[in-house]
């Protein structure tokens, strides 16, 4: 699909930018969340990545997979920069990190602390899974695809997808089985 | 509440059940907790993504309006907007990266209105994403009991067409199929055990396990050399070459991970890999032996899956013999070598997701493109299964499924040399093909009905339909024409062919 170059101002309502964001933002966010500790920092990094993308006038010429690869490379380097800057930052208090759960549920501090710990461990373990396991989980839990549909999309047999999905869940399940 | 581990046979239903229990606030059992945790994790990411979009739109808007204050408002229209190119014929209009027609001289108020519209559109998009996360999918797909049964259609009296001679004892984790040249042995990729298994086709005897080096498993394709000696197995990092008689691994060829700026000289050894990135299935994605077992045609991609190339390798040394550079494509899957070795065919997709069947004359230097025909429009992110494009033996005729991938409109047979359409078989929604060795019959499958339809290629008449309860994802006709092996949700079955 061919595109024309546009001035930065027109990118605001440009379907290409909407398309780029819609196609890649979520997986980019999931990727960045593995590398930075807080949601706010991850959002900042993803924002910076797409602001950088807006300045790349040839990005639209690339295929979807090339765009994805480019976005991930930029996100990686920005995550590295974030960690370098974090060395001189003060530590964020734990109660600020639990703010979301306090808003969502009325729970004791002990329960919240346990849940935070499990949540962080889940994200860590998720990041340690092979990339294709993570992709399968995302297709299942975000896009709601059944195993048959995932198999069709990923060029795998339904049996293989079922096996990998169940393996991934059982691996993550161990966090809560102790 | 019975808290069981997740099983392949019921994983979809188990997730649905745990999501349902989520809303009932059941006790914190491990299975419910992991589903709840993943649900919350991804929901959080979706919300963050929506939040970032709002910030992105406002940041760009603020920058734009600040710049507008200093612009010269008497600029000529052609200085603001570049002319739009013509959209190529056949481009998929549903793709999100399609430009609107050029605009002329919008007022600042008009731009603010557009900004508001953009925000509202994104809110609607994000709302649909969040709705997906909150949906419960109670539907239990039919036919997922995991018990394999075979219910072949009736065959002519006295015939045993469709009679199953062997079924694997387990149903899950199998992928890929290859017959030995003498039709006595079958090789299958067992993802569950990360190995290739070879056994006597009709009895399951003399089992050989080829343990694959990669952990976690990443093997994806497999091909048996026509001389019967070797099995080539592709994975994310390259190709494993194994002795088909003993199962011993002989070679391991690392496939180059490609970067746009890195040329790959012909004849040189293969190269280092990039830093791993997320997503995609890199490595060797297509794998076909030349009829003389000397060469391998391989589709390779980088670990970022950003580049794909069709290459010819020396099967003994792994040396690059030739790399195709004339496709201008964003997607290639090598499919089939003609029985006399003269032609090689592949499915090629361009950046507008237009898929085509290509064929090259391998007797010329450089290899000359002799055939290009439309397959249809397909999302490049939906990978092409193997065996969608096959040569009719002892001929220069190429058969492939046509139409949008996943919903083919039929199968066509082309004379490649004369670029002439010979036959069209009306088999909707079937896109997996295998031909009988004598070229007289075509078996096609891969539809939701879980069946294999066998046609007489001359008359186009359906002569037999093989049915099973589970999805069929691979088909292979034995070289002697007696059997068909099918692989899918019901495990691997070897049955009598017409």
Image (cartoon, coloured by chain):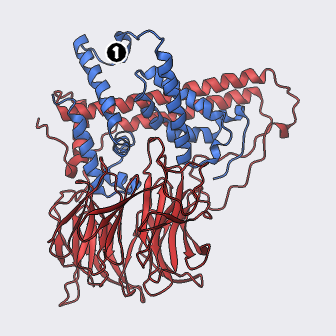
Chain colours: A blue, B red
Position in image of residue B402 (x %, y %)? 49, 70
Residue positioned 75% across, 26% down in the render: B108
Q: Nearest the camera: B1 or B277?
A: B277
| Res B377 seen here | no
Residue B444 drawn above or below residue B257: below
Q: Name the quadrant containing residue B35.
A: top left
Residue at 20%, 52% in the rendered image: B9
Q: Residue at x 65, y 29 (%)?
A: B115
Asked if residue B367 can be seen in this view, the reply is: yes
Q: Nearer the viewer, residue B32 or B114?
A: B32
Which of the 4 image quadrants contains residue B147?
A: bottom left
Query: Does dot 1 land on a helix, a strand or a loop?
Result: loop
Chain letter for mark 1, please: A
Point out the residue furthest to the left here: B2
**Residue A151 appears at what percent x and percent y?**
35, 54
Horizontally, residue B442 falls left or right of residue A118, namely right
Q: Which residue is mark 1?
A: A98
Disc 1 residue crowd, few under 14, some 14–19, many 20+, Cα 10 Å? some
Residue B391 placement, left or right of A145: right
Give residue A39's quadrant in the image. top left
């Amino acid at each position: 699909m061919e595109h024309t170059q546009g001035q930065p101002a027109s990118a605001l309502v440009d379907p290409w930018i909407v398309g780029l964001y819609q196609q890649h933002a979520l997986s980019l966010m999931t990727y960045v969340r593995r590398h930075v500790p807080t949601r706010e920092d991850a959002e900042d990094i993803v924002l910076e990545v797409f602001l950088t993308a807006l300045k790349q006038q040839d990005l639209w010429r690339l295929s979807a997979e090339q765009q994805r690869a480019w976005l991930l490379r930029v996100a990686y380097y920005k995550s590295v920069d974030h960690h370098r800057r974090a060395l001189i930052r003060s530590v964020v208090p734990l109660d600020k990190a639990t703010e979301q759960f306090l808003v969502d549920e009325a729970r004791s501090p002990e329960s919240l602390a346990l849940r935070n710990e499990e949540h962080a461990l889940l994200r860590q373990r998720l990041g340690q899974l092979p990339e294709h396991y993570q992709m399968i989980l995302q297709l299942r839990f975000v896009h709601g695809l059944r195993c048959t549909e995932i198999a069709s999309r990923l060029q795998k047999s339904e049996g293989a997808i079922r096996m990998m999905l169940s393996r991934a869940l059982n691996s993550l399940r161990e966090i809560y089985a102790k | 509440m019975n808290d069981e581990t997740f099983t392949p046979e019921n994983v979809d239903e188990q997730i649905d059940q745990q999501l349902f229990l989520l809303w009932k606030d059941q006790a914190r059992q491990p299975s419910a907790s992991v589903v709840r945790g993943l649900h919350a994790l991804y929901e959080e990411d979706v919300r963050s993504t929506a939040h970032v979009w709002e910030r992105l739109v406002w940041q760009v808007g603020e920058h734009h309006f600040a710049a507008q204050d200093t612009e010269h408002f008497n600029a000529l229209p052609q200085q603001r907007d570049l002319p739009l190119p013509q959209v190529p014929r056949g481009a998929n209009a549903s793709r999100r990266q399609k430009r609107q027609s050029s605009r002329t001289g919008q007022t600042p108020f008009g731009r603010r209105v557009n900004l508001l519209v953009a925000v509202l559109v994104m809110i609607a998009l994000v709302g649909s994403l969040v709705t997906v996360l909150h949906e419960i999918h109670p539907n239990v797909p039919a036919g997922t009991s995991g018990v394999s049964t075979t219910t072949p259609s009736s065959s002519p009296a006295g015939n045993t067409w469709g009679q199953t001679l062997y079924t694997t004892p387990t149903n899950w984790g199998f992928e890929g199929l290859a017959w030995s040249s003498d039709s006595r042995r079958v090789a299958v990729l067992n993802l569950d055990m990360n190995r290739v298994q070879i056994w006597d086709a009709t009895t399951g005897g003399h089992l050989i396990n080829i343990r694959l080096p990669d952990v976690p498993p990443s093997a994806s394709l497999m091909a048996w050399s026509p001389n019967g000696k070797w099995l080539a197995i592709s994975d994310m990092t390259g190709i494993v070459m194994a002795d088909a008689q003993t199962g011993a691994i002989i070679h391991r060829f690392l496939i180059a991970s490609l970067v746009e700026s890195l040329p790959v000289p012909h004849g040189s050894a293969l190269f280092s890999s990039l830093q791993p990135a997320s997503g995609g299935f890199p490595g060797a994605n297509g794998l076909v032996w030349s009829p003389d077992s000397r060469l391998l045609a391989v589709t390779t991609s980088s670990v970022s899956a950003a580049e794909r190339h069709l290459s010819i390798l020396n099967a003994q040394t792994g040396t690059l013999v030739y790399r195709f550079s004339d496709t201008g494509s964003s997607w290639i899957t090598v499919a089939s070598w003609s029985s006399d070795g003269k032609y090689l065919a592949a499915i090629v997709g361009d950046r507008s997701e237009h898929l085509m069947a290509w064929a090259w004359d391998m007797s010329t230097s450089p290899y000359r493109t002799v055939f290009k025909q439309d397959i249809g429009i397909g999302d490049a992110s939906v990978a092409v299964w193997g065996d969608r494009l096959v040569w009719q033996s002892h001929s220069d005729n190429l058969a492939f499924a046509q139409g949008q991938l996943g919903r083919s409109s039929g199968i066509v047979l082309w004379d490649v040399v004369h670029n002439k359409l010979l036959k069209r078989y009306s088999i909707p929604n079937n896109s997996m093909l295998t031909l009988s060795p004598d070229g007289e019959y075509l078996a096609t499958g891969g539809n939701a009905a879980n069946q294999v339809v066998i046609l007489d290629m001359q008359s186009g008449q359906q002569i037999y339909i093989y049915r099973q309860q589970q999805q069929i994802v691979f088909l292979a006709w034995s070289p002697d024409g007696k059997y068909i092996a099918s692989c899918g949700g019901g495990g691997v079955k070897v049955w009598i062919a017409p």
